């Protein structure tokens, strides 16, 4: 499994010659979707799904009902390629085993309505990866790589650290990282280095860099 970090929350997975892209949003360069065989989208926010990017290809899309509704309104030609999934579903997508995990976005503020959100647990080539979208929902079993949100209106550093600790993946790859400046991201990395236990590593990558 080749894992490439793209802008903000987008991660590209290559396994057995096929390409699966997660959450190509407005902060992600459209090139993340080049040659994509399939797309997974966690929720409807623009930093996770950008209809113009999806118009540029013909890859099938798996996502939750809220995203399908948005695409049906804004890009009906894209919505025709969508398969709606729900929590607990198990799929085979572009040669990768996928389990749909969780159903709610983290709380931004109690006065806002809650959004739906489902993460994805992927397994291919003897390696597993979990992308939670905008949530701190813990996967149902151990994973090798956690895509760990590090900056968001719904997240503080202590919560980010505790999430990485609880999942306890050998590698946590920083995602959801366009909200902070480089100084803020350096501070997050320093807290992770200070507070994570042995055996749990934290990695940052620039867009287009492999893990």
Image (cartoon, helix red, strand yellow):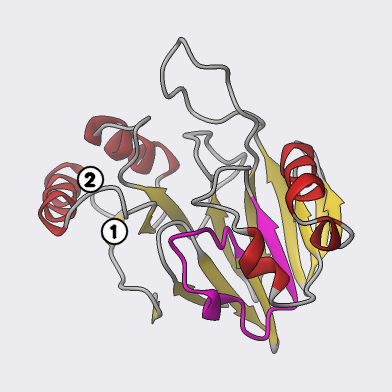
Over which residues does the magenta segment extend?
A: 22-41
Residue 62 drawn at (x, y percent): 77, 56
Q: Residue at x 59, y 44 (%)?
A: 141
Q: Circle 1 sits in a helix, a strand or a loop, which is it?
A: strand
Between residue 50 and residue 11, name the one nearer to us.
50
Between residue 124 and residue 29, name the one nearer to us.
29
Location of mark 2 (residue): 196
Q: Which callout, 2 or 1, points at the residue further toward the start of the chain?
A: 2
Quadrant for the N terminus, please. bottom right
Q: Are marks 2 and 1 in contact (CB under 8 Å)?
A: yes
User: Which residue of the protein is positioned furthest toward the bottom in this rendering?
Assistant: 17
State yes or no: residue 57 in magenta: no
- Say the numbered circle drawn on residue 201: 1
Between residue 188 and residue 199, name the one nearer to us.
188
Q: Is 189 rendered above or below residue 102? A: below
The answer to whether residue 132 is left or right of residue 170 is right
């Amino acid at each position: 499994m080749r894992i490439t970090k793209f802008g903000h929350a987008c991660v590209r997975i290559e396994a057995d010659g096929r390409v699966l892209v997660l959450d190509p949003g407005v902060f992600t360069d459209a090139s993340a979707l080049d040659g994509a065989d399939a797309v997974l989208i966690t929720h409807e926010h623009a930093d996770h799904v950008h209809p113009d990017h999806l118009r540029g290809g013909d890859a099938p899309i798996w996502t939750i009902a809220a995203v399908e509704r948005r695409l049906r309104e804004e890009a009906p030609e894209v919505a025709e390629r969508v398969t709606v999934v729900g929590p607990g579903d198990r799929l085979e997508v572009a040669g990768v085993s996928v389990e749909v995990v969780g159903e709610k976005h983290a709380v931004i503020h109690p006065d806002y309505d809650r959004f739906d959100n489902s993460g994805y647990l992927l397994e291919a080539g003897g390696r597993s990866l979990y992308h939670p979208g905008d949530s701190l929902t813990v996967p149902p079993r151990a994973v090798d790589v956690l895509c760990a949100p590090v900056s968001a209106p719904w997240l503080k550093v202590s919560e980010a650290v505790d999430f990485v600790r609880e999942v306890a993946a050998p590698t946590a790859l920083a995602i959801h990282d366009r909200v902070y400046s480089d100084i803020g991201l350096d501070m997050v990395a320093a807290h992770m280095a200070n507070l994570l236990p042995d055996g749990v590593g934290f990695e940052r990558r620039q867009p287009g860099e492999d893990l």
